[in-house]
Amino acid sequence: MDNVHKRDDVQVSENMSAPPLPPKYVMLNETNGLRPPPLRRNPPRYPSYQDRSSSGNCCLKCICFCYCCLFFLIIAVSIAGYVIYATFKIDIPKYRIEEFKVEAFNVLPDLSLNTEINVIVRAENPSDLISLQYEKGSSVTMNYIDKTICSGKVSEFYQGYKSIKRINIPLQGKTEFSSGFQESLAEDKKQGKIPLLIVVKAPIIVELGRIPLKEVVINVNISMIVDSLEKDKKIGIISSSYKYGLL
């Protein structure tokens, strides 16, 4: 029993000589100088919504900037083209009929008038800087007393500046040969003065060198009087007048 008390006394003395254990919890205040450990910041595994929104705004700004640059470039090119067009104003091409040949001018069994005429037109581009590109979609009509007797078109071709071209325009058509039409034509043939109206509409691209500036439609009205419309006979042009315009 004495030995047991001795062991207890030794254990108590050892416990009293050991340093005290730190407390599990510490109250923090400004006097004891302790500071809490810094908060741990873990980087996000995926970009945040705010980052995605910022990158999207940057892309949108870049696209808007590119479109604005393209818009202003188009305006600048248009203004430059207009200035060039105004500075080097277009001289309207000059046209003149050089040859007028009747291939057919006869009445068919169905009482319609068959007409085939070849017209050679001299086209002159007087401009020193502007060249002309004749496009598809042209039309040429020949009229007698407000009735179209034949029609055709101008072929596509390129005409450089300060140049002359001769264009062959074949015209063909069938017209109702009414009694009034027959009487009027017979009277004009007898007098040797047959009035005709040729209307030409030709879309043309105006070019400065080989740079296209503008597309226009040239409208030419040719009022002429010929002495005959007989086949295989040289047709004399008694008088002619030309009116030009741009559409």
Image (cartoon, grey):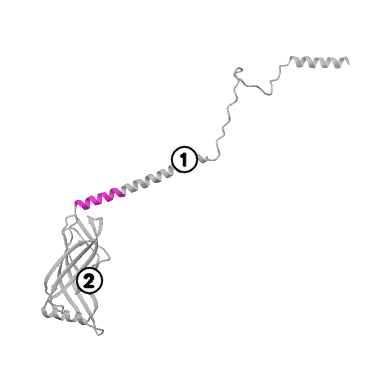
Instruction: Report the residue marked by disc 1.
Output: 54
Q: Are marks 2 and 1 in contact (CB under 8 Å)?
A: no
Q: Quadrant of the C terminus?
A: bottom left
Q: Amino acid at mark 2?
A: Thr
Asked if the stretch drawn in magenta spans residue 213, the answer is: no
Nearest to the eye among marks 2 and 1: give it: 2
Which quadrant holds the N terminus? Answer: top right
Image coordinates of residue 34 in percent, x first then y, are 60, 20
The answer to whether residue 43 is above or below residue 106 is above
At label 1, the amino acid type is: Ser
Q: Position of residue 8 (x, y in %)?
A: 82, 16
170 or 244: nearer the viewer: 244
Against 12, residue 220 (above or below) is: below
Residue interval drawn in magenta: 74-87
| Res 141 label | 2
Question: Foreground: 120 or 193?
Answer: 193
* Disc 1 residue crowd, few under 14, some 14–19, many 20+, Cα 10 Å: few
Q: Quadrant of residue 123?
A: bottom left
